[in-house]
Amino acid sequence: MRGSAGRPQVILGAGCAGLSLAVALVRRGVRSPIVVVDRRTEFGRDRTWCFWDADVPFAELASHRWSAWTVRTRTGAATGRSHRHPYVHLDSRDFYRAALEELAGHRNVELRLGETVLGLHEDPDGLTVRTSAGAIDAERAFDGLAGASPLLRGRPDGEVELAQRFRGQVVRVDRPAFDPNLATLMDFRVEQGGELRFVYVLPFSTTEALVEDTRIGARPSAPGTEALADYLDRHHGVGRFEVEHSEWGRIPMTTFDFPVHRGPRIHAIGLAAGAARPSSGYAFARTVRHTRALARALAEERALPARLAPRRRTALDTIFLRAMAADASAFPEHFRSLVARTSGPAFARFMTDAAGPLDELRVMAALPPRPFVRAAVALPRAPERARPVLRPAP
């Protein structure tokens, strides 16, 4: 892998997963050709990534940090704290800028923008990646196209299928209205409407904040700007504000077991590999840790990692998702209990896939056992069967 000759490693997508893999490869000293293909033609402020800084690559690029966070319900609030593992906000522009600048210094990296991936064909002799600009004879392909991937067309459902939909606005007000030292992860003091609904507030200063209306359900309703305006009026006394930026999205919360290896030469990364954690929707930390592990394995010519998380954590996420699907109305208090009864550092490590078994036991002890035990045993054990494999498009 360190040589300069041979067919390229082709990375499908120049988003978080694709660029983080390319950066990880060159940092590992890989000098063979690396081709990154994406239909985009520019890199802008298209998303925000937030996570706890628990040895997460690229965390140093974060623009804001909070060592305290809270969950609010109609009955009270719980606050967690950790100076060692603060909650951070990473603007996509800063990530793209840093990644592209680093890659520009390596002649073996080719960035092909404005080019759409149409399909892949794998045979015993190699791999062909078909794009709108022609075919690429590749050594391997790494699929970081998420929902746009031809490999995910017709994905079957998991045992539990929920989704998280959100709409956010960066707002600026003309007087102090926010506490810049405290991130509000979930404020459930909004009408639930038969779903799990909360507002997320990241204050950048006393007069500026990212405010998001978030809804979770099997078919969550579309969040609206009216709900955000009502929330700001009711809970922050803000009647008028200026919108500086808007964002929205949909994150799968599914028990579907995404195949990481789709063939001897085709591998998934990012959301296409199931990086969105089923119980929370957080994906950045899991994505960049996976791409770092892939790069290390490739550079050392070892077998590529087959999973993004330990099986025990996958099992915990499945139980959590089952319980949420069974009784979403109980979860505002479950989330508040989780923050109230877990230390800040343990909570941060658990939420960012850096937890050990002791941290996981602390999290389990913070939740009421009955609904989660019921969720663990409610459904019969599925018969043994092969993991689903999504075939590459011809």
Image (spheres, helix red, strand yellow):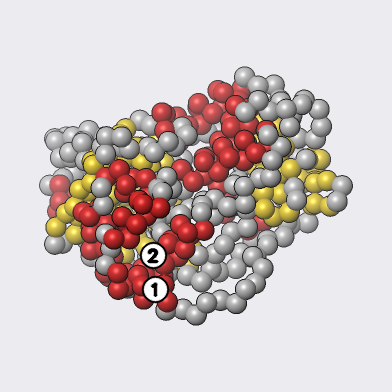
Q: Earlier in the sequence, mark 2 or mark 1?
A: 2
Judged left or right of residue 140, residue 180 is: left
Q: Nearer the viewer, residue 81 or 310?
A: 310
Quadrant occupied by the N terminus: top right
Tell whether label 1 touches label 2 (CB within 8 Å): yes
**Outermost right residue:** 125
Give x and y (percent) for residue 263.
73, 54
**Amino acid identity at mark 1:** Ala
Residue 74 appears anywhere in the view: yes
Q: Nearer the viewer, residue 131 or 128?
A: 128
On the image, the x and y values in percent for residue 146 come to: 57, 51
Q: Secondary structure at mark 1?
A: helix
Residue name at image x 31 percent, y 49 percent: 347
Asked if residue 5 is positioned above or below residue 269 in the image, the reply reads above
Q: Which residue is mark 2?
A: 320
Q: How many marks?
A: 2
Say left or right for 143 vs 71. right
Q: Is residue 281 left or right of residue 83?
A: right
Point out residue 157 in the picture as x, y percentages from the top left corner: 55, 69
Cα distance, mark 2 to mark 1?
8 Å
Compare residues 74 and 56 and report the one nearer the observer. 56
User: Which residue was labeled with disc 1?
Assistant: 375
Answer with the quarter of the image where residue 69 lies: top left
Extreme-top residue of the structure: 105
On screen, 172 above or below 200?
A: above
Which residue occupies 60% across, 26% down? 27
Q: Position of residue 147 (x, y in %)?
A: 57, 54
